[in-house]
Image (cartoon, rainbow, N blue to C red):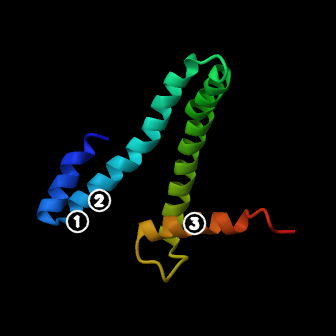
């Protein structure tokens, strides 16, 4: 989180948008990291210790594995759709990956009968 402070100052002084993007990226990586850091120190209390250990192991193990698999699958499908040019209205690979994410949300909704 402290690494983002110089980029915030540079953004405010120079009004260069690139520094703002770098600062946003660093903060978006730092906030979940801070949450995991606080979970580490929450293990010492008898009331919540076992629960926090379980959450910490779940986050670091299962969700990290899911994230890696999810990124691989989305990247592979994004590249395949970009090569086949199935979406004519999308101009770049980033837009195609975003469209795949939206399609995934639409197709796997819980409110469908």
Label 1: how many residues lie within 10 Å, few (<14), some (14-19) or many (20+)?
A: few
Report how far apart the C-alphas of labels 1 and 3 lie in the structure: 28 Å
Looking at the image, which residue is at 57% across and 52% down?
73
Task: Tell me: residue 45, above or below residue 95.
Answer: above
Label 3: how many residues lie within 10 Å, few (<14), some (14-19) or many (20+)?
A: some
Q: Nearer the viewer, residue 43 or 97?
A: 43
Q: Which mark is residue 100?
A: 3
Query: Where is residue 48, by image quadrant?
Result: top right
User: CB under 8 Å between callouts 3 and 2?
Assistant: no
- Left-right relation of 35 to 73: left
Q: Secondary structure at mark 3?
A: helix
- Percent across and percent down for residue 76 are 53, 56
Report how far apart the C-alphas of labels 3 and 2 lie in the structure: 24 Å
Looking at the image, which residue is at 46% across and 41% down?
32
Report how far apart the C-alphas of labels 2 and 1 lie in the structure: 6 Å
- Left-right relation of 39 to 111: left
**Disc nearer the start of the sequence (1/3):** 1
Looking at the image, which residue is at 49% across and 83% down?
89
Which residue is most to the left?
A: 14
- Percent across and percent down for residue 72 are 53, 49
Q: Which residue is mark 1?
A: 17
Which residue is most to the bottom?
A: 89
Q: Nearer the viewer, residue 14 or 44?
A: 44
User: The C terminus appears in which quarter of the rendering?
Assistant: bottom right
Task: Tell me: residue 99, above or below residue 11.
Answer: below
Q: Secondary structure at mark 1?
A: helix
Q: Which residue is mark 2?
A: 21
């Amino acid at each position: 989180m402290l690494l983002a402070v110089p980029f915030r100052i540079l953004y405010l002084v120079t009004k260069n948008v690139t520094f703002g993007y770098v600062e946003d990226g660093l903060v978006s990586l730092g906030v979940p990291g801070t949450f995991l850091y606080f979970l580490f120190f929450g293990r010492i209390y008898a009331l919540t210790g076992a629960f926090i250990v379980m959450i910490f192991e779940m986050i670091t193990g299962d969700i990290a594995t899911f994230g890696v698999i999810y990124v691989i699958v989305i990247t592979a499908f994004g590249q395949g759709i970009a090569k086949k040019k199935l979406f004519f209205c999308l101009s770049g690979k980033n837009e195609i990956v975003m469209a795949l994410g939206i399609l995934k949300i639409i197709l796997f909704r819980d409110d469908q009968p």
